[in-house]
Image (cartoon, rainbow, N blue to C red):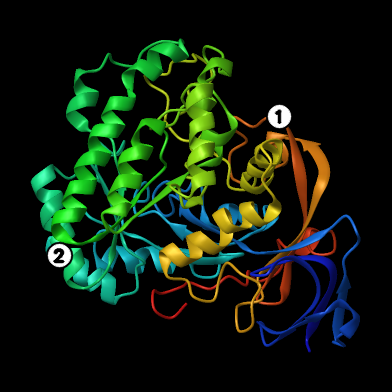
Amino acid sequence: MDLAFHAPRVITAAGEVARCVGVRDGRVVAIEPLDAALEATHVVRLGPDEVLLPGLVDSHVHVNDPGRTEWEGFATATRAAAAGGVTTIIDMPLNSIPPTVDVAALEVKRKTAQGQCHVDVGFWGGAVPGNLSDLRELHDAGVFGFKCFLLHSGVDEFPHLEPDELADALREVRSFGALMIVHAEDSHAIDRAPHAHGERYTDFLSSRPRGAENLAIAQVIELARWTGCRVHILHLSSSDALPMIASARRDGVALTVETCPHYLSFSAEEIRDGATEFKCCPPIREAANRELIWDGLREGTIDCVVSDHSPCTPELKRLDTGDFGTAWGGVASLQLGLPAVWTEARKRGFALTDVVEWMARRPAEQAGLMRKGQIALGHDADVSVFAPDDAFVVDAAALHHRNPVTPYAGRALAGVVRRTWLGGVEIHGPDVDQDIEGAAPRGRLLRRGAA
């Protein structure tokens, strides 16, 4: 073996067990009882307070590079990912310039990312008005699926689809078996809601009502039913939608759903006025809603938890004025997803195996990453050493993403990622972090069907 982990606690498909895990040529090639004592060139022995986890898969990350690299870039985002135990990300098609809506733009994105990535990176394509003929070419070029909005995306270069355009896009995507992922808020409901303005969080919350999310999800469900297309609902924040999602699945609609750490961690009642670092769309809702989102995970109606890491510069967050109407909407959290979710999950009786299911195996499965998300024979040797009982207070300035803004600043979290490996090579830990600036990043650019 090139590498062997002797771990009293490993999360595998069999649950949490004691195992020796052997690695050769970047893949897991042996999973043996702990007393097998596999020999290898490099041996890592975990302590009794440590757990060997599969590398997390974050399928919802806005890197913004090229074009808005001052918001975030591949080098900084992927360093943050590695420090958070995330070994694979899939980059969203908007906020970069150009947006990933045709093959030429995808090649610009790949050229920009080449040589900068500390973890493996894949790409979503975008579905926008007028690019129906580009979708098959993007699919053949290796994107993992297509993202669309049902209302203004926040950036003018990535316009939203009207219902008839969405229906056409779903039929096209269905014709070659691809996946459509949807930001589901209804534009007309948002237009009729009170406009966001000023410092009061309650006013911002009123500007993005649950009804707008519920209405859009209902429409997506029916279009998925009619077209037969596989559809994924992004960043679910309204618990009202859970019954109709469960009903659609019972009817055989090909539907999956994600939520995000911030919807599981925070509540509207605790967000002080002017705290624009909490602004995101759809918004963080009330505590009672949060608990029902947790119930959706418990019952399996929600499939996975991903970050929706959507950072910007401090100036765009309007931290000086605290104006929710003009601040950029997005939560920066890529490095903190695992401890944030674990902190809240264990309070509610969940185990680490549940967190790994939501944040590693299921996102990998949903995106079609067949060698990711599990410690299993033949899978990529992407793993992290996690200390679940350690605790820390978040220092925004110490995080690796580009700008030191996050709603988790000052929050006490449980669980520390001590070390991370990508393809059997350590990419985060006390022995490598000091040298990482000078080291060649090891992340690969992934293509659908080859990963």
The picture places residue 315, in percent across and down from the top left corner, at 49, 27
Q: Tell me the CA gap for discs 2 and 1.
A: 45 Å
Q: Residue 172 carries which label?
A: 2
What is the tally of numbered marks visible in this picture?
2
Q: In this view, does 14 lie to the left or right of 263?
A: right
Query: Which quarter shows the N terminus?
Result: bottom right
Query: In terms of depth relative to the viewer, which is nearer, 327 or 373?
Result: 373
Residue at image coords 72%, 75% = 425
Q: Where is residue 93 in the image (x, y as percent from the top left)?
A: 34, 54
Q: Is residue 111 left or right of residue 147?
A: right
Left or right placement of residue 302 versus residue 56 in this view: left
* Comes first in the chain, label 2 or label 1: 2
The image quadrant of residue 230 is bottom left
Q: Residue at x 42, y 63 (%)?
A: 366
Q: Where is residue 64 in the image (x, y as percent from the top left)?
A: 43, 49
Q: Name the residue under label 1.
A: 411
Q: In this view, does 406 lie above or below 54?
A: above
Could you say which is closer to the camera, residue 213 or residue 97? 213
Whether residue 129 is visible, yes or no, is: no
* Three-letter code, disc 1: Arg
Q: Measured from the top left, where is residue 229 in percent x and y?
A: 22, 61
Cβ atoms at labels 2 and 1 below 8 Å apart: no
Horizontal side of residue 233 vs 47, given as left or right: left
Mark 1 lies on a secondary structure that is loop
Q: Residue at x 46, y 73 (%)?
A: 446
Q: Which amino acid does label 2 sit on?
A: Glu
In terms of secondary structure, where does tag 2 sit? helix
**Between 151 and 444, the one nearer to me in the picture:** 151
Tell me if residue 125 can be seen: yes
